């Protein structure tokens, strides 16, 4: 079951992001990779971009760049107020940022407790945004803010 995290907002990567990276790579089919446009795993035969991307909310020295996948043409739009169940099937890093874009804290979260941990993080007025990342590769998946 997908949790409703109201009054929070899920941030995906805009479909224009690949065009800011001249080194982006086109992949005719790359099944099973997490696509940051619609927040699910890619299916066989779905073309994707592999690109460098700087996730929102980290600023200055905390603005990182890393690899992400996006659909070349995305027809899905995930619910802006629901955690994407398919990308939360494993452990994830929840990294919180303050309003200045500095890392506030980070922790590894297990499946089944994401909504509870996100709500707890936003109980802290210092927390402005949360980035959700993979544990194994550290890759950015999506961001969460208060609505
Ligand atoms: Zn997509």
Image (tube, rainbow, N blue to C red):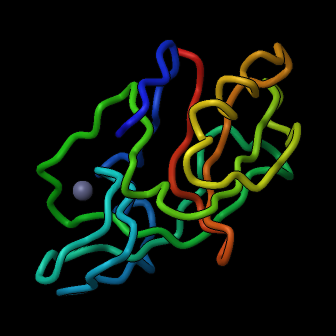
Q: Is residue 137 left or right of residue 121?
A: left
| Residue 71 rendering spot, x and y as whole percentages | 24, 64
Q: Is residue 119 left or right of residue 13?
A: right
Q: Nearer the viewer, residue 5 or 53?
A: 5
Q: Residue at x 26, y 74 (%)?
A: 48
Q: Residue at x 68, y 31 (%)?
A: 129
| Residue 101 rendering spot, x and y as whole percentages | 79, 35
Q: Nearer the viewer, residue 60 or 118?
A: 118
View quadrant of ligand 1: bottom left
Q: Is residue 35 left or right of residue 134?
A: left
Q: Nearer the viewer, residue 108 or 25?
A: 108
| Residue 18 rendering spot, x and y as whole percentages | 36, 63
Please say if 23 is above or below 121: below
| Residue 29 rendering spot, x and y as whole percentages | 20, 86
Q: Nearer the viewer, residue 52 or 45?
A: 45
Image quarter for residue 104?
Answer: top right
Q: Residue at x 16, y 47 (%)?
A: 76
Please say if 131 is above or below 97: below
How many numbered marks, from 0 up? 0
């Amino acid at each position: 079951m997908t949790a409703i995290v109201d009054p929070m907002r899920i941030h995906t990567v805009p479909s224009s992001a690949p065009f800011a990276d001249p080194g982006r790579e086109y992949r005719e089919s790359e099944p099973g990779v997490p696509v940051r446009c619609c927040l699910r795993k890619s299916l066989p035969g779905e073309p994707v971009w592999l690109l460098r991307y700087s996730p929102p909310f980290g600023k200055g020295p905390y603005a990182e760049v890393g690899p992400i996948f996006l659909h070349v043409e995305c027809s899905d739009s995930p619910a802006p107020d629901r955690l994407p169940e398919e990308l939360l099937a494993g452990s994830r890093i929840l990294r919180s940022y303050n309003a200045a874009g500095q890392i506030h804290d980070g922790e590894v979260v297990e499946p089944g407790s994401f909504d509870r941990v996100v709500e707890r993080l936003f109980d802290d007025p210092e927390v402005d945004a949360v980035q959700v990342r993979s544990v194994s590769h550290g890759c950015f998946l999506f961001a969460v803010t208060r609505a």
